[in-house]
Amino acid sequence: MAIPLFQTRQDERVIRSGPVQSRLEPTPPATQPPVVEMRGLTMQWGAKPVLDKVSLSMQPGERIAVVGPSGAGKSTVLRLLAGLQLPTAGELRLFGEPQEYLRLDQRRPPDVRLVFQNPALLASLTVEENVGFLLMRLGRMNSAQIRERVQQCLEAVGLNDVADQYPGQLSGGMQKRVSFARALIDDPDRDEGAMPLLLYDEPTAGLDPVASTRIEDLIVKTTTVARGCSVVVSHVHSTIERAAERIVMLYGGRFQWDGSVEEYRVTDNPYVVQFRTGNLRGPMQPSDH
Ligand SMILES: Nc1ncnc2c1ncn2[C@@H]1O[C@H](COP(=O)(O)OP(=O)(O)OP(=O)(O)O)[C@@H](O)[C@H]1O
Ligand SMILES: [Mg+2]
């Protein structure tokens, strides 16, 4: 039996764009809780916090890009959302639930999927085993069903005939796409109302422009069809503008700017202008951190 990768649901056309202004303000009451709610979130290792009491709210269906220079704390934001580390201070809620434990220690973890900055594939497993890992562990599908589903995910990221190969036999860009397919794979028995939060760390770094476009469209497609939310960290302008509808600029431990892609293109906010134009002059300087 064919198991569709993307199940069509009646409301898949509805993508909430959310308000574009005052996003750092508390959000008005909604029927569903925000998917992400950070309140005064701080992450500190050394003398200076990497994230300094940041607040951000994300509504169902939103696609956000987090941008900022290297070392600004973008991957840290994703690791906190993925439950790989706990904040030093402040509150993080996902789907309305306070996150007090690391993800591994949670009894009913939220559906959060992280595509790492490096592909992080298991070298001793084939591509098929890597992508189908979760389904094999759940043990609810037979191997033919898993194979078919893995194949659909690989095709969705533009990979054919690689299922039996090992990661070491693939190029860096292909490995990246395999890691993307792994995040797409879905448990068919998952709760009807479930809404994944998809996190992508530099999803298009090292890919050629066509492969990048495919990945960008895939981010939009999976977010829409799975009725999920996505947070994309990227320096690539096409990815920021194509995969996201809202952009937040992280620098100096704070979200310095928050707005729609349209606003991002025209704003005269000095942080955004410097990032957009790649200018060496501006408020963001290497000596600052
Ligand atoms: N586990 C850790 N222990 C100590 N410091 C850490 C740890 N993880 C991150 N940092 C520090 O936090 C800062 C932000 O790191 P992060 O990886 O979030 O940056 P980034 O914005 O993703 O950068 P890049 O664009 O280069 O990937 C860096 O100064 C980094 O050294
Ligand atoms: Mg990073």
Image: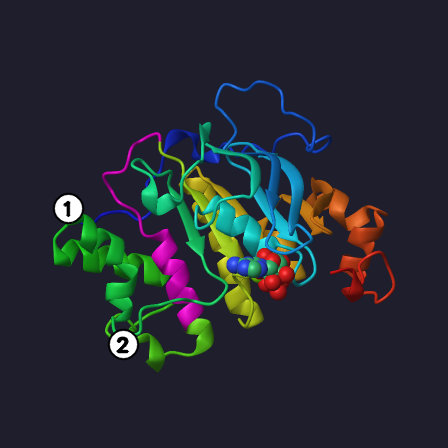
Residue 58 forms part of the magenta stretch: no
* Residue at x 80%, y 58% (from the top left corner): 284
Q: Which residue is drawn at 30% across and 57% down?
A: 152
Nearer to the camera, 51 or 26: 51
Mark seen at residue 140: 1
Q: Where is residue 44 in the image (x, y as percent from the top left)?
A: 61, 50
Which residue extends farthest bottom? 169
- Residue 228: image x %, image y %? 45, 39
Crowdedness near tag 1: few (<14), some (14–19) or many (≥20) residues, C-alpha within 10 Å? few
Asked whether 87 or 111 is in front, the reply is 87
From the viewer's perspective, tell me whether residue 21 is left or right of residue 45. right
> What amino acid type should be assigned to the residue bearing mark 1?
Arg
Q: In this view, does 206 lie above or below 111?
A: below
In whole angstroms, how far apart are the C-alphas of marks 1 and 2? 25 Å
User: How far across and how far down the image is residue 272, in percent?
Assistant: 78, 52
User: Which residue is tagged 2?
Assistant: 165
Helix, strand, or loop for circle 1?
loop
Q: Which amino acid does label 2 sit on?
A: Gln
Q: Give the magenta-colored segment's residue range.
A: 175-193
Disc 2 Cβ-to-ligand 2 distance below 8 Å: no
- In the image, is 265 to the left or to the right of 212? right
Labels 1 & 2 near each other (Cβ < 8 A): no
Give the class, few, some or many, for how many residues have Cα within 10 Å of label 2's Cα (few <14, many ≥20): some
Q: Quadrant of residue 67?
A: bottom right
- Please identify the quarter of the rendering in which residue 58 is found: top right
Quadrant location, ligand no. 2: bottom right
Q: Secondary structure beneath disc 2?
A: loop
Apparent side of residue 248 relative to residue 125 in the rendered image (left or right): right
